[in-house]
Image: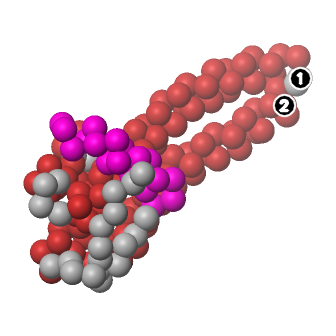
């Protein structure tokens, strides 16, 4: 059974820290672009630090910080995995398509595989952007004292908190 918390008596500090946890996705997003990914191993953990600061003081902040952490982890690791694995598969496919030019099938495969590469590049760019947009919505909602639940992520975080594994750590 998930833990529950009330949004009726939230302090301004709780609203602010929950909002900061979500908004830290922009540090990850922009910092990842500006630093070519160097800052990602640090910036992804900002919400987790907020979780550890508030886990015993505010269930509201703890829940939202964990949601923000999972969202950033999925957004950054997912984009990296999509880029590396998808890029490798695309590269192998393109080499095969180019080699297939010898038997004329490649005339169709090379442009088709080029379109697959474009779709892959778009997906790699959209994933972190979607992460930042969801985080913006969550930051605004939590700053205004409303509960925001990411699809799928909120249910998982609720189950983890209900199992109290994260409370022991």
Say if the magenta span includes residue 24.
no
Q: Residues within 10 Å of mark 1 (few under 14, many from 20)?
A: few
* Numbered tag placed on residue 104 in the rendering: 1
Q: Which is more toward the observer, 133 or 166? A: 166
Q: Main secondary structure of the magenta part?
A: helix
Q: Position of residue 47 (x, y in %)?
A: 23, 54
109 is higher (above) or lower (below) than 1: above
* Numbered tag placed on residue 107 in the rendering: 2
- Residue under the point 28% across and 38% down: 165
Q: Do labels 2 and 1 touch, CB within 8 Å?
A: yes
Q: Position of residue 5 (x, y in %)?
A: 30, 67
* SS of the residue under disc 1: loop
Q: Position of residue 169 (x, y in %)?
A: 18, 37
Q: Is residue 25 left or right of residue 126?
A: left
- Residue under the point 28% across and 42% down: 164
Q: Position of residue 25 (x, y in %)?
A: 31, 58
Q: Residue furthest right?
A: 104
């Amino acid at each position: 059974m998930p833990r529950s918390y009330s949004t009726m008596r939230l302090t301004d500090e709780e609203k602010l820290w929950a909002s900061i946890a979500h908004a830290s996705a922009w540090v990850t997003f922009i910092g990842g672009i500006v630093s070519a990914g160097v800052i990602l191993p640090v910036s992804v953990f900002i919400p987790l630090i907020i979780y550890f600061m508030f886990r015993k003081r505010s269930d509201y902040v703890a829940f939202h910080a964990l949601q923000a952490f999972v969202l950033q982890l999925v957004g950054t690791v997912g984009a990296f995995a999509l880029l590396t694995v998808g890029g490798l598969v695309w590269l192998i496919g393109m080499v095969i398509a180019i080699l297939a030019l010898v038997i004329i099938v490649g005339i169709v495969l090379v442009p088709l595989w080029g379109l697959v590469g474009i779709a892959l590049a778009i997906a790699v760019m959209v994933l972190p952007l979607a992460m930042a947009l969801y985080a913006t919505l969550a930051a605004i909602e939590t700053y205004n004292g409303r509960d925001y639940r990411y699809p799928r992520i909120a249910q998982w975080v609720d189950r983890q908190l209900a199992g109290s594994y994260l409370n022991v750590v």
